[in-house]
Image: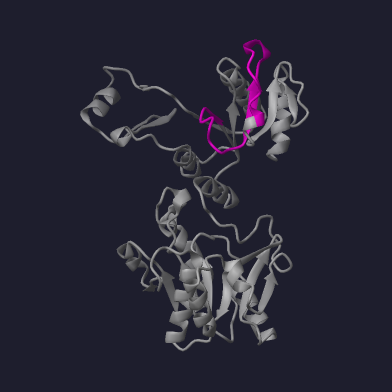
């Protein structure tokens, strides 16, 4: 652990509504059975003090973390600037000249974040603000703020300023470019704004394999291609998980069997196990279908987390990478023009150059293309 000569307070901003997460408290959404907030706390533990949480609703849900809770001083969910004002005001109350602010949805923060920010502040004493930077982008919510600019921020909010960049344009800013000091294949300031981002995070953490879907009109041969791909992958030692969406009610156990009777009696869930295989049967409550992202998450957990790639069939409107399956005899247009997630086409008569075109009848070439794309060698 790094040793710091100067310890500064920190506020984790968790007061947003999380609209793209279905309106849930983003800080409490689980990533691999842990709330997102816990990842941020882990990264700064022992490097900042004291710590406070900027929360505006559902306070009881955050009491268990044991940190001081500070609310936005201006009501109305005015965005991150209101949370930053709360942070500056709190720092002034505890007689601190600086305060670090962090979002609650950045689980991959660099280990040297605090040390680097403090060093940058000390090199240029006249600054009002030290901002993290990566991949050519500034991250003003991940910043070290001088607490005595709180009145200036209060006035800006009163005048209707809502965007951080507009407010910080009047400040003396120092930037810390973490691309120069953090060698990483992904942006350490990646924030999770959607269920798709949660899948990406699990892949970054190595707990979820890559996945792709098969998109195509009915009759194009998606299931046939999926079966052939799985057979090819399996022959060369690549373990494939599959997730198939059904549009109708289905049973996987037969009437009269013990498992069927137990399920009909109300058992939730049922697990059937033998030395050859096991099966989990779970009824959805009140006919509420689980989302693709909830289903995919199961592949990150024991004992089904042993696949190298996941093939998804169905879920055609979901925002995941897709291979389009197109057969000319069905006389339907290509889908890729209206779906930016389609990365290639497998067709029996493809004349497309905008994205890679593969011969639907050459399963080996499709297999090799996917092996290379997803680094499955």
Q: Residue at x 40, y 52 (%)?
A: 24
Q: Quadrant for the C terminus, please.
A: top right
Q: Is residue 377 visible?
A: no
The stretch in magenta equals: 312-337
Please name whichever residue, 57 or 211, is drawn nearer the observer in this view of the structure. Answer: 57
Q: Is residue 77 left or right of residue 321?
A: left
Place residue 306 in its image quadrant.
top right
Q: Position of residue 226 (x, y in %)?
A: 59, 23
Q: Is residue 194 visible?
A: yes
Please name whichever residue, 258 or 89, is drawn nearer the observer in this view of the structure. Answer: 89
Q: Position of residue 70 (x, y in %)?
A: 39, 73
Q: Quadrant for the N terminus, please.
A: bottom right
Q: Is residue 371 magenta?
A: no
Rendered image coloring scheme:
one colour
Q: Is residue 372 left or right of residue 250?
A: right
Whether 117 is drawn above or below 295: the answer is below
Q: Is residue 335 magenta?
A: yes
Please name whichever residue, 112 or 337, is drawn nearer the observer in this view of the structure. Answer: 337
Q: Residue at x 53, y 86 (%)?
A: 97
Q: Residue at x 58, y 38 (%)?
A: 320
Q: Is residue 238 left or right of residue 90?
A: right
Q: Position of residue 247 (x, y in %)?
A: 43, 24
User: Residue farthest to the left?
Assistant: 265
Q: Position of residue 6 (x, y in %)?
A: 57, 86
Whether 258 is drawn above or below 211: the answer is above
Whether 220 is drawn above or below 122: the answer is above
User: Residue farthest to the front?
Assistant: 159
């Amino acid at each position: 652990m790094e040793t710091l000569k100067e310890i500064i307070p920190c506020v984790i901003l968790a007061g947003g509504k999380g609209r793209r997460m279905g309106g849930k408290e983003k800080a409490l959404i689980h990533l691999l059975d842990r709330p997102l907030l816990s990842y941020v706390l882990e990264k700064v533990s022992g490097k900042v003090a004291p710590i406070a949480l900027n929360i505006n609703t559902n306070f009881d849900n955050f009491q268990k973390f044991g940190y001081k809770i500070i609310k936005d001083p201006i009501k109305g969910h005015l965005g991150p600037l209101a949370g930053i004002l709360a942070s500056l005001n709190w720092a002034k109350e505890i007689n601190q000249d600086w305060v670090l602010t962090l979002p609650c949805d950045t689980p991959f923060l660099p280990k040297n974040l605090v040390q680097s920010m403090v060093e940058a502040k000390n090199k240029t004493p006249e600054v009002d603000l030290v901002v993290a930077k990566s991949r050519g982008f500034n991250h003003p919510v991940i910043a070290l703020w001088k607490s005595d600019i709180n009145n200036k921020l209060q006035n800006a909010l009163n005048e209707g300023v809502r965007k951080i960049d507009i407010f910080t344009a009047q400040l003396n800013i120092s930037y810390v470019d973490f691309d120069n000091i953090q060698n990483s294949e992904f942006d350490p300031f990646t924030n999770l704004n959607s269920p798709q981002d949660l899948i990406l995070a699990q892949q970054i953490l190595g707990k979820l394999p890559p996945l792709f879907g098969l998109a195509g009109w009915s009759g194009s041969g998606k299931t046939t291609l999926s079966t052939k791909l799985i057979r090819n992958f399996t022959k060369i030692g690549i373990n494939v998980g599959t997730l198939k969406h059904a549009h109708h009610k289905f049973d996987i156990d037969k009437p009269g069997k013990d498992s069927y009777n137990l399920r009909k009696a109300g058992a939730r869930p049922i697990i059937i196990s033998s030395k050859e295989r096991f099966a989990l049967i779970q009824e959805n409550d009140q006919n509420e279908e689980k989302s693709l992202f909830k289903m995919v998450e199961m592949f990150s957990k024991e004992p089904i987390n042993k696949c190298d790639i996941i093939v998804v069939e169905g879920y055609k409107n979901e925002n995941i990478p897709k291979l389009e399956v197109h057969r000319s005899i069905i006389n339907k247009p290509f889908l890729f023009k209206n779906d930016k997630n389609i990365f290639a086409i497998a067709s029996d008569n493809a004349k497309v150059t905008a994205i890679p075109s593969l011969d639907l009848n050459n399963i080996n070439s499709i297999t090799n293309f996917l092996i290379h794309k997803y680094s499955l060698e």
